[in-house]
Amino acid sequence: MGCWKQEKIGTWAFPTLILCLYGFFYMMKPSEPFLTPYLTGPDKNLTTEEVTNQILPVWTYSYLALLFPVFLLTDYVRYKPVLLLQGISLIVTWLLLLFARGVVAMQLVEFFYGMVTATEVAYYAYIYSVVSTQHYQRVTSYCRSVTLVAATVAAVLGQLLVSLADVSYFYLNAISLASVSLAFLCAFFLPMPQRSMFFHGKDAPEAVPGPGKGLAVGAARRAPSCQEERSPDPAARAPSPQPQAGSARPHRHGLSVLLQLGRDLRDCYSSLKLLCWSLWWALATAGFNQVLNYVQVLWDLRAPSHSSAVYNGAVEAIATFLSSVTSFLVQYVQINWDHFGELALGIFSAIDAGCLFLMHFSTSIWACYAGYLIFKACYVLLLTIATESNEANKQMKQHFLCP
């Protein structure tokens, strides 16, 4: 029985299933599209100015402050403890949303939610530490798909409960609390990875790349481990001998990890094209997060929730569905993105900018809804194009996904 259980856990399917369940319950939060109406409504009785100027900015700054240290912590503790930390942060967030009152309490909500978003790196990084490279694309597809489905289902459920069953926002948050609690329980069943990208990588002699070597040397440095993962020979896939008692473990110290990070960044970003795409990605993601953070405030200004019907859940559901459709259809478009990626980047970025101007200057809530739908669909489409295009980008994936 114990051998069967160990064999089952050792396969790629078991951790993928648990991670998909975690992702589903993590994203199954029907109260999220109605956060601003909940905070400014009778449950919390906060003003729009307090929400906009004192509460929502806390998420931005806490996320920024936590992102890099959490990234290093994620690698050091090998992912699973950070997923558990994310689950605890989610539970604390919704407990405070349900039972705490006042500006300070809601600022704590935003801080813990900043912790939640900062620890998202562990969700996708975890799977690459427990499955072989030939399953990366399939597993990533499963994990991304299940989160999109969960977000859509949550938004539809929230809208139906509000519009048809007249369920209060308080009970939507109670449903969200139950869902994130299930996600936390799922995280316990994830097997603990034995390696990670930096702190617990395999020991191998590393050649310092000379001038002009760039990405090729960085990719070659990890080529043996990648080849070993892809090899059909069972002997090649056999686990390496475990170190004897008292021998040194393949564990790197903090300074060596930082030096390795510096070398990896230098190798990857020696490509000017990759550097430009990465800058766009960073700026676009920052802008998208700000829109996502404040768009409900805009909607509440255009159509106050205390006197108008609220369709935030329906808009989020449609936006998520359109985003998934556009990103799915990219693979069937016969375009060389390495040649036309920059043109698409400019066109759709201009469309996104136009949507932002439309939402700002329009007084119609329906125009704001339409602008948001187009904005989010174009943003996700551009991320997909940025992922599919650029040969240097593909080399960077090879560089980092082969520990």
Image: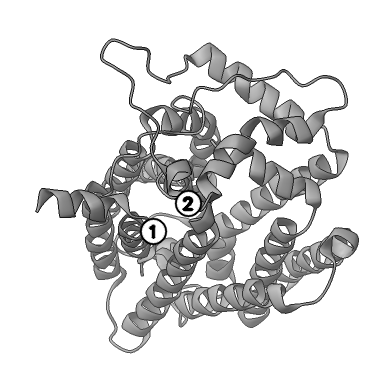
- The reply to whether dot 2 and dot 1 touch (C-beta < 8 Å) is yes
- Hey, which quadrant is residue 119 in on the image? top left
The residue that mark 1 highlights is 39
Residue 283 shows in the view: no
Task: Tell me if mark 1 has few (under 14), some (14-19) or many (20+) residues whose alpha carbon lies within 10 angstroms of its own.
Answer: many
Q: Amino acid at mark 2?
A: Val
Question: Is residue 14 found left or right of 121 in the rendered image?
Answer: left
Q: Quadrant of the N terminus?
A: bottom left
Residue 72 vertical placement versus 47 (above, below): above
Going by the numbered disc 1, the residue's amino acid type is Leu
Q: Earlier in the sequence, mark 2 or mark 1?
A: 1
Q: Write down the residue under mark 2.
A: 51
65 with respect to 34 (left or right): right
* Residue at image coords 73%, 44%: 395
Identify the residue shown where x is 40% and y is 77%: 153
* Near-viewer residue (152 or 5): 5
